[in-house]
Amino acid sequence: MQISDVSLRRSFTSRGDATIEATVKVGSIEATVTAPAGASTGEYEALHLPSGGYDSVLKSFKKGMLLGIDPLNFKDVSDALKKMDGTSNFSQIGGSTSFAISVASAVAGARASNMQFFETFHLKHQMPFPIGNVLGGGKHAGPGSPDIQEFLSCPVGAKSVFEAVSANIAVHHEVLKQIEKRDPTFAGGKGDEGAWAANIKDEDAIELVRSSIDAVSKQLGIRIIMGLDLAASTFYQNGVYNYSRKGKKLTSEEQLGYVENIIKKYDLKYIEDPFDEEDFEMFSRLTKSVNVMVIGDDIFVTDTKRLRKGISMRAGNGVILKVNQVGTLYDAELFAEEAEGAGFMVIASHRSGDTCDPYLAHIAVGVGAVLMKSGVVGGERISKLMELSKINDDNPQIALWRPII
Ligand code: PEP
Ligand code: MG
């Protein structure tokens, strides 16, 4: 089985960012994949698009280097893309081009082999729970919204992915009700990922989401845990955490105390990027002092070298895996393998600017993720959630993660 053709087209993400769509052919079978794009990007991520955009991509794109490769050989496809690009961060062909070709190759290869895409991964499969943001702020919403980027809900007591997705939607609806009660003039705005974008302070927002989750959990009789993605690198400026929207500045030491305090006060079980992406030390101190999921996104950027440093320092106990941060499925799978080998949990994640492609669900199951972070509502989020639900229904032999928190 060989890649027989590859073509690129211009496209857009759900936020309207320019991106790349790739179609890979394997004989008469083909697959088309469009790359997502982040807004709160880590310093060390692959570059989404070169400054010259699509035209510049086309100048560096050499289709011939991919023809003849086995589309299911993640490494050979990755090596060819890296050779074609020639830089360390895909700054010539763009991480978007690399992502789209890498995923489309595997999807086409799976179709040509009558396999499901998730079956083409080499790690132990697992069914993750969906985790989604119901209220948002930071770089995903406007200036009146919280500094904290994501207020997350995850129904770990659900018996199936469908039940979990339904519970998260119920929380999303309940959050709207509670926002409207506080602010009858709320116009129903949403951020980039479909979470409500309300004019509310961080702690009031935590309290509101806590009470919404508790109400839905009680009503449905399902355990639902709450989490936050602070995306703290986005507001770490000149050595302080600058909660500018609320006029509060915290030193690193104060930030640690603040995060420990809200974890305890609001019974948070999941904390993502509570510190700047360079502050491995604080990640390590928090991980030692609390018994919750401490997850690194911008700090690791799906990069195995950065992860090794994090493992040696116990800087967290879980990682976000975003294939487009590193550029290829091969490198993302190595990252997951390294994480799982060290007992770190893997959370497969969407991007704030995403597409209606469902493939994240297969990546999540394929790498044995414990959670799939992909929002709650919106076409580009529902496509992944319903694909995960379908994989769950069709494959009862793949067990749902058993939460350890
Ligand atoms: C995140 O920070 O987890 C996220 C999904 O945001 P973005 O895609 O903007 O990096
Ligand atoms: Mg994040």
Image (cartoon, grey):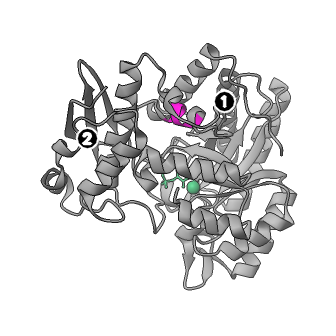
The x and y percentages for residue 363 are 52, 36
Q: In this view, does 76 lie above or below 93?
A: above
Bounds of the magenta segment:
360-364
Q: Is residue 404 left or right of residue 319?
A: right
Which of 36 and 222 lies nearest the eye of the viewer? 36
Disc 1 crowd, CA 10 A, few/some/many (<14, 14-19, 20+): many
Q: Is residue 188 left or right of residue 91?
A: right
Which of 184 and 39 lies nearest the eye of the viewer? 39
Residue at x-position 25% and y-position 27%: 25
The residue tagged 1 is: 127
Which of 227 and 26 lies nearest the eye of the viewer? 26
Q: Is residue 79 above or below residue 364?
A: below
Residue at x-position 78% and y-position 72%: 285
Report helix, strand or loop for mark 1.
loop
Q: Is residue 255 above or below residue 292?
A: below
Badge 1 amino acid: Met
Q: Is residue 35 visible?
A: no
Residue at x-position 60% and y-position 67%: 232
Q: Which of marks 1 and 2 is in front?
A: 1
Badge 2 amino acid: Ser
Main secondary structure along the magenta-highlighted residues:
helix
The residue tagged 2 is: 11
Report helix, strand or loop for mark 2.
strand
Question: Mark 1 vs mark 2: which is more N-terminal?
Answer: 2
Residue 293 part of the magenta segment: no
Q: Is residue 181 left or right of residue 110?
A: right
The x and y percentages for residue 218 are 85, 30
Q: Quadrant of residue 298?
A: bottom right
Which of 351 and 21 lies nearest the eye of the viewer? 21
Query: Distance of mark 1 from mark 2, alpha carbons?
Result: 31 Å
Q: In the orientation shown, which residue stands out farthest toward the bottom?
A: 238
